[in-house]
Image (spheres, rainbow, N blue to C red):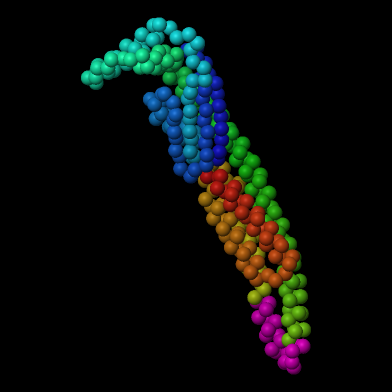
Amino acid sequence: MTGFAQREVVLDGSSLSLTVRSVNQRGFEFYLRSGFPELEMDLKQKAKILLQRGKVELTISYSQKTQAPSIDRFKQKYSEFSKALTEIGLSVNYDASALYRIYERSFEPDLLNQTGDITKEIELLFLELDRSRKKEGDAHLVELKGLIAKLTGFREVVSARAEKATEEKQSTLKARLLSLSPIDDSRVLQEIAILADKLAIGEELVRLIAHEERCLDLLKKENTPQGKELEFMSQELLREWNTIGSKSQDSVITHAVVDAKGCIEQIRELAANVV
């Protein structure tokens, strides 16, 4: 399921913007875009337990930095950077641009000792995302049930029309055969039986009923992957409706087939958003 959630939190006098979004995916992927790589593994595990599936992207950014950087903080950043260079055996003469970048970092809040607070806020953010995804899922569920109900209606139209359409075709065939030349009754009956067999769609209608019932059963399941099987069932539905369309020479049935295939395409699109 797709979903989106955002929170603004204030830590160490600065505002942090926390944004998480997800898109549908059968597996689970997690991406953290922030200056806190040390949080990634823990957050990934928490997100996977709650969300289970999907491609999740979390962004942590400063929406408002410290208004007035202190000289102490600038010295601290300068000292940390110099010490790091010394430990790896490098010696660098700082130019104005390098010093300015260090100065810029002094605007950023010192959150190294507040990662626990950040994690708690992000856990709340994940809960908001989960609610967002479930809300979309509920909307998809209502829409899918409505589409299956439409398919049932189209099938009932075809079922009600099929017998009469076959009788009309048989009558037309019989009249044509008799108008061509003298022909015995057994030959007429044979041709009519062949036509009836070609036009028969009883088996397709029975299978459609089974497919519709299976789709509804899938929609009743909770906390179970459904998207892949729904996509498969839409293919099976399409197969039966295509067969009906190829057998039918009746305008009422043909129109129902076209409408049904449109519904099935919508079901396939929705199934792609259901894991």
Q: Residue at point 58% right, 52% down? A: 268
Camera sees residue 110: no
Residue 20, position in %: x, y? 52, 30
Identified at 56% across, 29% down, the residue is 5
Q: Residue at x 55, y 45 (%)?
A: 274
How many badges with numbers are in the image? 0
Front residue of 118 and 88:
88
Of 112 and 61, the residue lying toward us: 61
Of 67 and 42, nearer the camera is 67
Residue 272 vs residue 168: left or right?
Answer: left
- Residue 11 image position (x, y, % from top left): 49, 15
Q: Is residue 251 magenta?
A: no
Farthest residue to the front: give it. Answer: 96
Q: Is residue 174 above or below residue 46?
A: below
Say whether residue 37 is visible.
yes
Location of the N terminus by quadrant is: top right
Left or right: residue 227 compared with residue 192: left
Q: Main secondary structure of the magenta part?
A: helix
Is residue 184 on the magenta stretch? yes
The picture quadrant where one finds residue 195 is: bottom right
Bounds of the magenta span? 178-197
Q: Residue 61: percent from the left, percent from the top?
A: 48, 23
Work out whether 70 lies above or below 18. Answer: above
Residue 161 lies in quadrant: bottom right
Give how far across and how far down residue 206 sits, in percent. 64, 64
